[in-house]
Image (spheres, grey):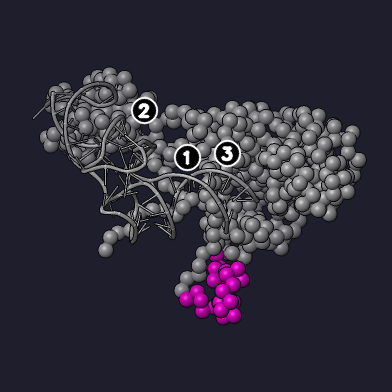
RNA sequence: GAGGUUAUAGCUCAGCUGGUUAGAGCGUCGGAUUGUGGUUCCGAAGGUCGUGGGUUCGAGCCCCAUUAGCCUCCCCA
């Protein structure tokens, strides 16, 4: 019997040490900025009750949930008629009580309702954990990937939105990205335009169609709109509005003069003006801000401002997105808690930085010094020195056995260990060790205090 | 769910209209160098050509099936 070839599920990945270090750099940068803006970390289980997740992401989303088969005799409770009819869709909730989380927002809403009496409102949390989607994998799309979310529950202040922009800006700038765009829009602005064009009843269809503008162009959108029951007359009213150019303030001003006013429009305009005013007094890094009227962000729970972040110079989808939802927790029976939040896709950020060659030399993490094994005679001294280094809080290791020096230096080289220590006969006779700087190749005889001083300041 | 494309050494790939023993670079290991890596030179190991079947005197190459990866649509981070 031959062992199965080792493999991992499609759309998942192993990470080697260098990749892991780079990923941690992204996550740590995000966590640092989130903390700086007053967000507190939480974690939730990888598994949620299937009932918590279904119906929250639309029909497509439900299909992309990874469901977990019940333990034990999972067929026992299943409906015999459905089984005989091989009705997978209807059977799924009977066979699977749990599923892997699909994003971090819905679990957060569940969390807020469950712990509402333990939380201080407005509650600002950050969360960086993997999520799973049963999507067909492709470039920039994985079945297991990490999201970094910040959300605030219990506040309608547009200050949060302004801070989200600053957070995106600060994290991505800190990671070395210089070319990226934060796109803004407002669901009520879209709804207001639909109303002004006389197709308020087709709001969802309008969103789906107009969201593709940058991909399929105005003519493509015309076709898409008419396929979705929007009349050519309505479409010709709508399209020029979506072609408006300029800074966010300029676009808003043009809308004001060109579109017949309505309550939705003016509410959206007030929100966006307020948010931009807040943002104007916050620190700016690298981001380009764009009011993109064609940004719709699917059919999910957003009701107010919406965001999406794209990196320039790469063919990778959005690296982040988010927005405001008037009623975050209503889906769990507790209404009246508004929310807003954004997500950063850590894996896509990784891919962007990788493709642009922006992973700077990360400060080597890990072993600071390797003690070269000289001979069996020197073992006691080598191991004693090792312990003393570790007591001094210096990450140190010894080569696992005496070996050719070249081999041991080669090991240090591959692991990018910056220093090596040799305790040969001559050194031991003098009560010192030879400390070698692996980068320059320079080496000098130093005593223990000298070693510690050198390595702690290195 | 639909379509396209690829699969040859640890990695990246070459392999002519089907023809003896399937190659290269990088990496690995050994040596030049028994107290010194990252440079150089010499040498070696490493392959059921994704899997199963078929055509043929003969298949890495042609045909069928199958599996997996990548890419596109849908949707998203």
Label 3 residue SS = loop
Residue A277 in sight here:
no
- Where residue A456 is drawn, which disc sits there? 2
Q: Nearer the viewer, residue A84 or A64?
A: A84
What residue lies at 26% left-to-right and 63% top-to-bottom?
A1
Query: Disc 1 and disc 2: Cα gap in Å?
Result: 23 Å
| Comes first in the chain, label 3 or label 2 | 3
Chain identity of mark 2: A
Region rendered in magenta: A73-98
| Comes first in the chain, label 1 or label 2 | 1
Chain identity of mark 3: A
Label 1 residue SS = helix
Residue position for label 3: A316
What residue lies at 21% left-to-right and 32% top-to-bottom?
A407
Callouts 3 and 1 close, C-beta under 8 Å: no
Which picture quadrant has residue A177? top right
Where is the C terminus of chain A found, in terms of image quarters?
top left
Task: Specify whether A99 is left or right of A340.
Answer: left
Residue position for label 1: A24
Image position, residue A61 (x, y; %): 63, 57
Query: Disc 3 and disc 2: Cα gap in Å?
Result: 41 Å
Residue A84 falls within the magenta-colored stretch: yes
What residue lies at 39% left-to-right and 42% top-to-bottom?
A16
Q: Nearer the viewer, mark 3 or mark 1?
A: 3
């Amino acid at each position: 019997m031959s062992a199965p070839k080792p493999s991992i599920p499609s759309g998942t990945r192993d990470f080697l040490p260098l990749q892991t270090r780079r990923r941690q750099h992204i996550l740590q940068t995000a966590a640092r900025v989130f903390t700086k803006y007053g967000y507190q970390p939480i974690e939730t289980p990888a598994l949620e009750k299937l009932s918590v997740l279904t119906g929250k992401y639309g029909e497509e989303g439900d299909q992309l949930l990874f469901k977990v088969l019940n333990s034990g005799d999972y067929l026992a409770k299943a409906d015999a008629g459905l089984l005989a009819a091989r009705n997978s869709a209807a059977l799924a909730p009977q066979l699977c009580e749990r599923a892997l989380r699909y994003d971090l927002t819905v679990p957060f809403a569940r969390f807020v309702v469950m712990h509402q009496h333990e939380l201080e409102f407005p509650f600002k949390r950050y969360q960086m954990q993997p999520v799973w989607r049963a999507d067909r994998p492709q470039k920039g799309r994985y079945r297991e990937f990490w999201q970094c979310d910040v959300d605030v529950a219990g506040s309608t202040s547009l200050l949060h939105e302004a801070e989200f922009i600053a957070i995106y800006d600060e994290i991505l700038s800190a990671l070395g990205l210089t070319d990226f765009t934060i796109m803004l829009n407002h669901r009520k602005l879209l709804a207001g335009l639909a109303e002004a064009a006389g197709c308020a009843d087709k709001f969802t269809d309008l969103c789906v169609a107009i969201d593709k503008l940058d991909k399929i162009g105005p003519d493509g959108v015309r076709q898409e709109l008419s396929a979705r029951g929007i009349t050519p007359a309505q479409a010709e009213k709508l399209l020029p509005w979506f072609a408006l150019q300029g800074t966010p303030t300029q676009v808003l001003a043009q809308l004001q003069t060109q579109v017949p006013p309505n309550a939705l429009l003016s509410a959206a305009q007030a929100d966006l003006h307020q948010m931009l005013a807040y943002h104007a007094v916050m620190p700016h890094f690298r981001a380009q801000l764009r009011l993109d009227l064609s940004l719709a962000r699917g059919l999910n729970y957003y009701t107010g401002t919406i965001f999406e972040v794209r990196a320039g110079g790469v063919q990778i989808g959005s690296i982040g997105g988010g927005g405001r939802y008037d009623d975050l927790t209503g889906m769990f029976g507790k209404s009246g808690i508004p929310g807003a939040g954004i997500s950063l896709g850590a894996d896509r950020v990784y891919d962007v930085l990788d493709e642009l060659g922006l992973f700077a030399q990360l400060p080597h993490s890990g072993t600071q010094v390797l003690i070269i094994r000289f001979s069996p005679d020197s073992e006691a001294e080598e191991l004693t020195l090792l312990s003393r280094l570790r007591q001094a809080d210096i990450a140190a290791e010894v080569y696992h056995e005496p070996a050719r020096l070249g081999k041991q230096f080669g090991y240090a080289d591959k692991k990018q260990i910056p220093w090596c220590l040799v305790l040969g006969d001559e050194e031991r006779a003098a009560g010192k060790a030879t400390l070698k700087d692996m980068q320059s190749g320079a080496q000098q005889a130093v005593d223990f205090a000298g070693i510690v001083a050198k390595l702690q300041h290195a």
